[in-house]
Image (cartoon, helix red, strand yellow):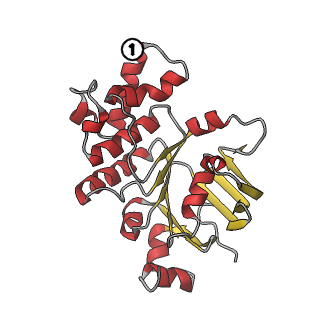
């Protein structure tokens, strides 16, 4: 199946070419070709097990941590750099490509230490700079006004929605180019979800966002472009409103209208 490229006219942050991915002997992604545009929000949708989270985790090589998991064909480039090049530093890749998970996972440390952790392990010790980054990152995650008077308190004292925004602040503190979001709102209540979704619109001014979601309304509210996956294949990729309102493929039409999945 040849899928049209709706972002050919835009600068790409991520280029995926002919990617086949395996967990051991089981192939889970089949000949994926996809360009993800810079400073836009792109959503991956599709039923459980369709490969959308697997592809997301390819972008910062999180799948490397699973025995036998590998891209066996094709290439992935981020800002023009092949992420499987032997010369690539994977630690630096994960600094450039931040990730926010389904369940918020703050460290058992203070709010301040959560934000500065990534910088400190890279050797940053300047207190004035760390203070600046903490405020800048918390403002970027729309959390500063809520926590500025308790930065020395445990991150575990925050609500679920605040913890998720703290994890976003922690991810942007190291100044990534790309932010990956794997079902970032699935554990949140509707009010917290709305706060995080509002944040997406601000974040894409500085970062490229890739969001995996089962919530099609969330994709419609937050994504500029949406890709539908099914059984490890890319079915359709288009501007979000086009994909939902005028899909080209019957499979897409069936999925967005709730006929399966």
Q: Which image quadrant for residue 217?
A: bottom left
Q: Which residue is mark 1?
A: 128
Q: Residue at x 65, y 72 (%)?
A: 3
In the structure shown, which secondary structural element does the residue marked by tag 1 occupy? helix
**Quadrant (top left, top right, bottom left, bottom right) of the N terminus:** bottom right
Q: Position of residue 213 (x, y in %)?
A: 44, 63
Q: Number of numbered discs present?
A: 1
Tell me the crowding category of disc 1: few under 14, some 14 to 19, or many 20 or more residues within 10 angstroms, Cα based: few
Residue 5 is left or right of residue 42, and the answer is: right
Q: Residue at x 42, y 35 (%)?
A: 170
Q: Is residue 224 visible?
A: yes
Q: Residue at x 38, y 39 (%)?
A: 106
**Residue placed most toward the observer, 117 or 190:** 117
Q: Position of residue 33 (x, y in %)?
A: 68, 64
Residue 232 is left or right of residue 118, and the answer is: right
Q: Residue at x 72, y 60 (%)?
A: 24
Residue 221 is left or right of residue 11, and the answer is: left
Q: Is residue 11 visible?
A: no
Q: Which image quadrant for residue 227?
A: bottom right
Tell me: residue 132, above or below residue 180.
Answer: above
Tell me: residue 6, above or below residue 253.
Answer: above
**Residue placed most toward the observer, 36 or 25:** 25
Q: Position of residue 76 (x, y in %)?
A: 70, 52
Residue 151 is left or right of residue 127, and the answer is: left
Q: Position of residue 30 (x, y in %)?
A: 70, 68
């Amino acid at each position: 199946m040849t899928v049209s490229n709706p972002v050919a006219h835009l600068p790409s942050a991520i280029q995926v070419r002919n990617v086949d991915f395996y967990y051991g002997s089981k192939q889970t992604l089949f000949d994926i070709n996809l360009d993800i545009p810079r400073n836009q929000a792109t959503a991956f949708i599709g039923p459980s097990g369709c490969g959308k989270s697997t592809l997301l985790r390819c972008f910062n090589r999180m799948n490397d941590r699973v025995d036998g998991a590998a891209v066996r064909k094709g290439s992935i480039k981020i800002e023009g750099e092949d992420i499987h090049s032997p010369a690539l530093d994977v630690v630096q890749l994960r600094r450039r490509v931040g990730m926010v998970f389904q369940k918020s996972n703050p460290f058992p440390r203070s709010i301040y230490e959560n934000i500065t952790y990534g910088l400190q392990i890279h050797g940053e010790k300047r207190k004035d700079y760390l203070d600046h980054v903490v405020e800048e990152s918390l403002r970027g995650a729309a959390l500063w006004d809520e926590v500025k008077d308790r930065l020395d308190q445990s991150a575990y004292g925050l609500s679920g929605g605040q913890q998720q925004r703290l994890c976003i602040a922690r991810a942007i503190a190291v100044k990534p180019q790309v932010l990956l979001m794997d079902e970032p709102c699935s554990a949140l209540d509707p009010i917290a979800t709305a706060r995080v979704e509002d944040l997406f619109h601000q974040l894409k001014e500085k970062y490229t966002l890739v969001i995996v979601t089962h919530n099609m309304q969330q994709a419609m509210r937050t994504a500029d472009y949406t890709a539908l996956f099914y059984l490890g294949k890319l079915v359709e990729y288009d501007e979000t409103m086009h994909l939902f309102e005028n899909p080209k493929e019957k499979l897409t039409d069936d999925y967005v209208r709730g006929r399966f999945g």
